[in-house]
Image: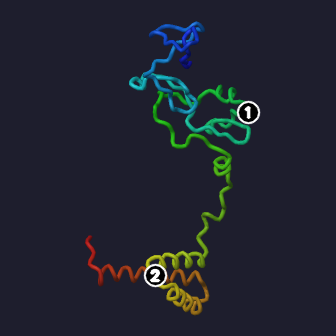
Amino acid sequence: PCARTRRGASGRGGRLGAGAMSGDGVVPRNPQHVRCKNFGCQQFFDPTKADQTTCIHHKAPPVFHETVKYWSCCPNSKAYDWDEFMKIPGCQRGTCSTEGAKKQVMGGCDVRADAAPKRIDDDLPADPRKKLDRLRAGLESIGVESSSFDRAWGRLAAKHGDLGVVVSHMGKSFTEVLQSMDTDEVNLPD
């Protein structure tokens, strides 16, 4: 139940005294009370006594996709009318909050992203050529000339004929160079 504010019984905007009711039985809202920011609650509460309020709300933001409206935590309760959407009961019980969520609503893009099929090749190891391309990009970003890198892996590919072997050899060579830097050329603190 939500306490609403209304103009005085005369309709001229007069303020009602504390505890007074207007002509239609609505109790005016206390000016220190704020609206709960939990999804779907809409209750006014005293922020100094938030732990004493009961809040029935949704744990995730609403989805507005084309004409359908529903709470992303309760996808089986859909509505096409705003009033019906607001009547969907909350799925969580807690206390009212003044802190709003970062993501306030979800739309079609969010729904499609969540339902997107998982690629079956995501778990497969990367193609050796792609590994070499990523390595070239990384080396270029620290100032290594790409032509030097291309010559080195080109010679290895001509010698071994398999890019998997080239990637393995490059990995071993870089590891050796980094380990030699650790012991020979660079005095790093432990």
Residue at the (38%, 79%) spot, across then down = 178
Per the model, the C-alpha gap separating discs 2 and 1 is: 61 Å
Q: Quadrant of the C terminus?
A: bottom left
| Picture quarter with the N terminus | top right
Q: In the image, is residue 5 above or below residue 179?
A: above
Q: Position of residue 105 (x, y in %)?
A: 60, 41
Q: Nearer the viewer, mark 2 or mark 1?
A: 1
Q: Which residue is painted at 38% across and 25% down in the image?
A: 48
Q: Earlier in the sequence, mark 2 or mark 1?
A: 1
Residue of label 1: 80
Residue 26: x percent and y percent?
56, 12
Q: Does 75 sit left or right of 172 as displayed?
A: right
Horizontal relation, residue 115 to residue 187: left or right: right
Q: Position of residue 158 (x, y in %)?
A: 59, 92
What residue would you read off at disc 2? 172
**In front here: 151 or 165?**
151
Identity of the residue drawn at 52% across and 28% down: 93
Q: Nearer the viewer, residue 82 or 60?
A: 82
Q: Nearer the viewer, residue 4 or 168?
A: 4
Q: Position of residue 85 (x, y in %)?
A: 67, 30
Q: Which amino acid type is marked by label 1?
A: Tyr
Element type where label 2 sits in the image: helix
